[in-house]
Every structure is written in structure tokens, then in C-alpha cells.
Image (cartoon, grey):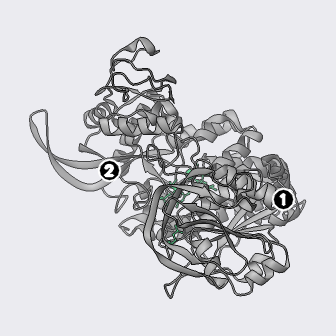
Amino acid sequence: MDPKAVKSDLVLILDFGSQYTHLITRRIRALSVFSLCISGTSPLSSITSLNPKVVILSGGPHSVHSNDSPSFADGFVDWAQSNGVFVLGICYGLQLLVQRLGGEVRVGEKQEYGRMDIEVEKNCGIFGGKKVGDKQVVWMSHGDEAARLPDGFEVVARSQQGAVAAVEDGDRKFYGLQYHPESEGTPGSLNQTFRVAAHSMLALGRAWETALSGDNTFGCWGLVTHSPEGMETLRYFLFDVCGVNAGWKMEDVMDEEIEVINNTVAPDDHVICALSGGVDSTVAATLVHKAIGDRLHCVFVDNGLLRYKERERVMETFERDLHLPVTCVDASEQFLSKLKGVVDPEMKRKIIGKEFICIFDAFAHELEQKLGKKPAFLVQGTLYPDVIESCPPPGSGRTHSHTIKSHHNVGGLPKDMKLKLIEPLKLLFKDEVRQLGRILKVPEPFLKRHPFPGPGLAVRVLGDVTEGNALDIVRQVDEIFIQSIKDAGIYDSIWQAFAVFLPVKSVGVQGDQRTHSYVVTLRAVTSQDGMTADWVEEFGAWGEVVEGEIYNTAPDDSSVLSPTPATLLNGSPPCPNQGEPPISTSYSTVYCFENSFLKEVSQKICNNVRGVNRVTLDITSKPPSTIEWE
Ligand SMILES: Nc1ncnc2c1ncn2[C@@H]1O[C@H](COP(=O)(O)OP(=O)(O)OP(=O)(O)O)[C@@H](O)[C@H]1O
Ligand SMILES: O=c1[nH]c(=O)c2[nH+]cn([C@@H]3O[C@H](COP(=O)(O)O)[C@@H](O)[C@H]3O)c2[nH]1
Ligand SMILES: NC(=O)CC[C@H](N)C(=O)O
Ligand SMILES: [Mg+2]
């Protein structure tokens, strides 16, 4: 996709390392405005060549006082001012703007982490839609604060602690928010039935808090870690203050992509597509097929690292639902022999990346015999998070998949690769790819599939994948886990679930006999784009979301509830004390059903998978962990 061909104005994000930077991009795209994110320390030419209408400076973990704190390029401010480009600093971005323009940033007397009230002090610019004295709840996360503003700047809002919360210099079109407007909640990826309900009293309390706050939020449910009016502020800023033209539509993305592909691939060129059965490559293949028709040749590789019956299942669905020409190459021997004895995760990934390309080259060679012309291009389903994560701002401390692990299709590619890449999705997030897939009428089962990494089970069997029957074990455990999740009707609510084989043995007792067998672990996460993730905390139980009103009733009075809860765990939502007026806030969760999902899965695994006597659950989020174990 050519960013310059997009019909919408561009809002460019300069990333200084905040965990939320990619959220700003997503929020802006949700407003139908095209947004890209590049490193905050990019040279000025990289910024100017994109011709943005607005530049947003992101938050970040640094203090502007430290020597190695990242900053925007020299000349940026002058360029923005002389070209009428609007600049908005968020948190660290505000502090950076203030400092670089001659103001002063200090360590605040009080730090502000979490929920804060702010009050509008001046009715202008970014809060033009508000009145002086209007208050709103925002989410803050900073220790430094603007102590003296540069000439021309005014304070527009302050926090309840008196700290500067919003500033602007309307003449020069510079704006700043000390809080995070992008952290406004969006509906969680777990459906409400599953996500909001909770097993323990603690979780119930948190769910209740969420219910009272009127919102169930992604990544922060129950903790009210968001700015409820953040999206509205961004909308007002972009459209009313900056006059941005919206026009970012998935339909346009599709048309632009098709045009780019047609301009890249000559009329007699042939193209290979690495097709895995996953969302990304299926959408990429469908898109490229729409552009060049039968000159597209898809290849699905069985690398010996696929899940239970995956090859048969994927080939069957390709044939039945996709109607694209797909060749299946069985390269399992080739991959497994190269992986024999290799335990280092990076080595494994590099070997797999290289083998994939060998297969694609061989496939291109075979096609040359048939077609008389060698395909020059390889289509892959690379996504935007890969691109963002490949250019981390210095010292951001963020989890970067590319530097932490070489994804087989990017960092794992050999340097002397001959096929030229076509990556039509590389500016999109996964949910946007799913949206594009729907426009392209890709069948739902493909779009809803959990992501499965190209290196497959090699990153889910720790150590040597060829050791003993580790691959077989993890296949069986994975199948039981995923089938149970599907049977429970919660597959679509989870971003990704899978089993991991640990090369560790523990003592057990099965059939009155001592066993010394392997340990497996189950991992299930929710996420919006794979860049950050939460483990599925609600696994112990899930329940029914009940929409309604809170009445001053006895906790177990089910007369106000429909449907009647099967089991009411540990009480009910907080009821007002006797004599107080009934609460009439609407709520969205209360009741949980006792559930033994994990107990049953664990039992099934130990009863059915020989060689396993212990099942554990991974309860780490990303960060600090990553989703995959290697
Ligand atoms: N078994 C395979 N055969 C052929 N190509 C593959 C295979 N596994 C991965 N690829 C290629 O590597 C790319 C990256 O893999 P990745 O897993 O990120 O994407 P995906 O499989 O298309 O979708 P998903 O992330 O939903 O699994 C794929 O888009 C595809 O081009
Ligand atoms: O195609 C892929 N090739 C890879 O090498 C690879 N490594 C991780 N993943 C997938 O990327 C997402 C984030 O994974 P991590 O948190 O483990 O980095 C998760 O969805 C992972 O499954 C990969 N996908
Ligand atoms: N979230 C941020 O951008 C924080 C900025 C800076 N590190 C501070 O603590 O003030
Ligand atoms: Mg995949």
C-alpha cells in the first residue's frame, strides 16, 4: 500500500516508546483517518516525505531530563510551523514539546498514576467543545510535569492535584495532553458473557466496578484505567481543530492494494503465495488473486510442525471453501532433520525461516518448468505490528517481537533471498485484516481462526522438537484443549489458545502406579493485535451477563433477574444499605456459574495422552512474557 495514495489525510505518530502508541494509531483509524506510526527519532526527511496533516508525539517511559531520552529531529518544530502542521504531544510528548520549545519540565511533587479528574480552565482549542469548569475523568501515568510553559502556550486544563493536564499554543498549532486520550476502552475481545463474569469474589468486585463505570474495557477491565471521553477529544481535535479529511475505508484499502499489485506485477509475471490456512495469508492470497487471477500459485507447506490433522483439515477447507489453486508440499522430513538436536529458540526460528524459502524457491523452479517463466514474487501475510515492532525507539524497553524473537517470515528470512516480497497487509492490524477479509468474502472459519505461528509446534515444544514423542504429545494435548474450548462455545472469544510441551518430568500416580512423566502447560490469551496480551483469567468459571437495573433487593432475590442464575457465587452486587434509595445504575454482570472447565480438560489430558501426568496453566500476560514460549 502506498501511504501517499490513501484518500484520507495522514496523522503521523512519532513513537517514543509508550505501551499505548499503537493504540493511538488504532483509535485514529477507527475515526476513518489514515494513521501511521514511525520511530520518534526518525530523521526529519522521513516525516516530511509522508506529508502528514497532524503529527502526534506519543508518551514514553523516559524522562526528558535523562541524557539518553529520545527526541524528535532538529528542524521538526520549524517545519511543522511553516507548513501549518498540527502537533499534539501526549504525556512524554507534551513534556518533550514544552522542553524543546523553551519551557520547563520538572519532577512533579505528586505523581499521577491512574484515574484523575481534570477541569477545563480555558475554553479554547482542544477542549473547544467544553465549557470552563467542565470536569472529566482521565487516565494519567506520569511523574514529570510541565512547570513553566514556553512563550505562546496557555494552560487549558488542570488535574485535581493542580498539575498541567492540557496546554496549547493555538497560533502555532501546538497542543499537549498530559493524560492518555487513546486509552479509552473499547469492547473487549472476549464476549461479555465470558469476559465480564468472574469466579472469585475479588473478580466479582472488579467486574462490578466495571459494570458501575458503565463500560467493559479492553486490557484493563474492572480497573477503570481509561479516559472515557478520550475518543471524543481526539475526534474534536482532529476534525474541529485540525480540519482533517477522513477517508480511510477498508474498501479503498482493497482497491489501492489491487492497484499497487497490478503496478508491481507485470502482465506476464507469475506469483507464489505462501498460504498457511491462517487469517493473514488467506486474506493476502484472496486479495492478490483478485488482482492477478490465475497467475497466483499458492503453496501450503507441511513442515512437520503442524497441529493434529492440520494438513488434511486445511487442504480440505482450501478446496471446499476457498476455491484457490493450492499445492501442498510435504517437507516434514526436511524440516525435522534440520531441527534435530537444535535447542536454541533463535536457531530454530532461523532454520525454519530458511527452509521455508528453500521450499518456495524449489516450488518456483518447478513452476518454471511448467509455465516457461519463473515466478519472481512471493506473497506473505506480514502485518503492521511486525513493522512497528521492527523499529523500536531507542531504549523504549518495549517488548519487540523482532528483536526478542525472529518471526520466520521477517527476521528469519535469509539475506540472499531471490523472490521479491509482496506484503499487501503490512500496514494493517489483525482486526483490520479480518475486516478486509469480510469485504473479500473470505469464509468466516478462516477469519476466526486463532493465529498459528509459521514455526508452528517448534516454538511450543521447548528444546529439541525431535526428542522422543514431544511433537505427538503436544499435538494431542492441543487438540483436547482446543476442542474443549470449541465445545464450550468460547473459541471466538479468545485471541489464541494452545498447549506447550515442557521437557520436564514430574512424579505422579496413575492407576496406583508411580509415574515419571512429562509436564504440559496450557496457554490462552486475549489480545487485540498480539502486541500486548492478557491471560484468560476467567477460565475457572464463566457466567451470564445480565443486563438490567440494580434494585435494593436481597442478594439472592432472583425475581429481578432473568435468566435465573444457576449458582450465585459469594453474594451479589453491592446493594444499598437499608433506608437508602435504590441504586438504579444499569449493570452488565453479576452472576457466575460454577464451572469446572479446566478440571475437565486436565483430566481428559491425563487420561488420554500417554506420557503426561501433570497439566499447568500459564498465567502471565505480555509483557512480561510473550504469547509463544520460544
Ligand atoms: N505452513 C505454511 N505454509 C506456507 N506458508 C506459511 C506457512 N506458515 C506460515 N506461512 C507464511 O508465513 C506468513 C506468516 O505466518 P503467520 O502465522 O503470521 O500468518 P498466517 O498463518 O497467514 O495467519 P495467522 O497469524 O492467523 O496464523 C503467512 O502469512 C504465510 O505467508
Ligand atoms: O507467523 C509467525 N511467525 C513467527 O515466527 C511467530 N512468532 C510468534 N508469532 C505469533 O505472533 C503473535 C505474537 O507472538 P509473541 O508474543 O510470541 O511474539 C502470536 O500470535 C504468535 O503466535 C509468529 N507468527
Ligand atoms: N506516560 C508517559 O509518557 C510518562 C512520561 C514520563 N516518563 C513521566 O513519568 O512523566
Ligand atoms: Mg499462521
Q: Which residue is mark 1?
A: 243
- Residue 602, compared with residue 293, is above or below; it is above
Residue nearer the viewer, 260 or 512 = 260
Q: Amino acid at mark 1?
A: Gly
Mark sitting earlier along the chain (2/1) = 1
Residue drawn at (74%, 82%), measured in percent from left and top?
76
| Side of 100 where 114 appears, left or right | left
- Residue 383 visible? The answer is no
How busy is the neighbourhood of tag 1: few (under 14 within 10 Å), some, or many (20 plus)?
some
Neighbor class of circle 2 (other Cα within 10 Å; few <14, some 14-19, many 20+) is few
Q: Is residue 40 above or below residue 324?
A: below
Question: Which quadrant of the figure contains the N terminus?
Answer: bottom right
Q: Position of residue 96 (x, y in %)?
A: 61, 78
**Residue denoted by label 2:** 469
Query: Foreground residue, 555 or 116?
Result: 116
> Looking at the rendering, which quadrant does residue 175 occupy?
bottom right
**Left or right side of 40 for 461:** left
Query: What secondary structure is marked by label 2?
Result: loop
